[in-house]
Image (spheres, rainbow, N blue to C red):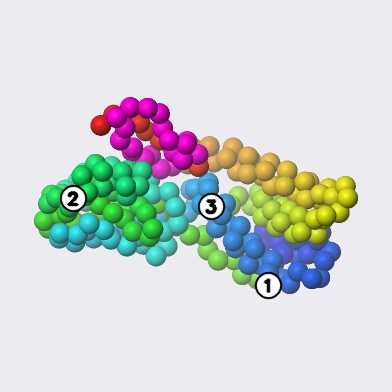
Amino acid sequence: MHTTRILDKIEHKLQDSSYAREELLSDLNDLLSYVTAIYPLPNLQTTADVVALIGGDSVALPDDYHSNLYRVENTTNAKVCKIVFNFKVLASMHDGLTVAGSVGDVAAENGFLHFRKAPTVNETLKLYYNKKPTTLLDTVSSFADCLPNHLHDPILVSYVLYDKFSEIEDGVEGKRNNTIFYWERFMVGMQNLQTFYPNTSLQNIYQRFAKGSLPQEMKSGGYLTKQENG
């Protein structure tokens, strides 16, 4: 469904001219960014090379990086890098020191790919990740093509209507008929999205533990996790 049609459907069901079309379009783009961050979609998978410079410890992630760094290959030494939970874990694994050697462990955080060890020659790292979705425009040639077409209405239309009706119906006695309806419709749409793409590549992160269970933040987000003693 093209973006103009999506906006037309939202306006028709909303019946409230106080919401400018430009605002609804902005909400659609924010929503698409959110949906594609919490559930990485196959159509957004891409690769890019970055260079770990001699003696360095980090490099900027690609401009189009969005989420779900699920594989990193050191093509200089033909080895796969271990993706660790965050920079804190990476620093702990290497005692916080930048020791000279080949890049083998990485962590994506705050727009950077942090790595250990510090290479003695420039090393090329091939990143596999999900890129940002294309910005939607109010035209018939603009599509949220990363999402299956049959889910545009239950996900995109429903969430924007839920968001607006939650404002309109706020404080109204017996309120939230529309709010609840569109929220439930959105949630069904998200469930159907996961059913449609049940085996998409998800980040497999590594966390070192002396003992105990995975922390709560590793259990959430829909990503695969691995517990290894270290």
Residue density around tag 2, few if under 14, some if 14–19, many if 20 or more, within 10 Å: some
Q: Position of residue 192 (x, y in %)?
A: 63, 40
- Residue plotted at (51% across, 52% down): 37
Sooner in the amino-acid sequence: mark 3 or mark 2: 3
* Amino acid at dot 3: Thr
Mark 3 residue element: helix
Task: Decide if residue 86 is on the left or right side of residue 116.
Answer: right
Separation (CA) of disc 3 from disc 2: 35 Å
Q: Position of residue 21 (x, y in %)?
A: 72, 71
Mark 1 residue element: helix
Q: Which residue is mark 2?
A: 97
Residue 29 belongs to the span the image colors magenta: no
Check whether the beta carbons of the residues at disc 1 and disc 3 lie within 8 A of each other: no
In this orientation, which residue lies closer to the viewer: 115 or 32?
Answer: 115
Q: Which residue is mark 1?
A: 22
Q: Which residue is mark 3?
A: 36
Q: Position of residue 66 (x, y in %)?
A: 45, 57
Position above or below: 122 against 200: below
In this orientation, which residue lies closer to the viewer: 209 or 44?
Answer: 209
Task: Decide if residue 84 is on the left or right side of residue 6.
Answer: left
Count of picture labels: 3
Sooner in the amino-acid sequence: mark 2 or mark 1: 1
* Amino acid at dot 2: Leu
* Amino acid at dot 1: Glu
Separation (CA) of disc 2 from disc 1: 49 Å
- Residue plotted at (22% across, 49% down): 96
Sooner in the amino-acid sequence: mark 1 or mark 3: 1
Residue span colored magenta? 201-220
Mark 2 residue element: loop
Q: Position of residue 75 (x, y in %)?
A: 21, 51
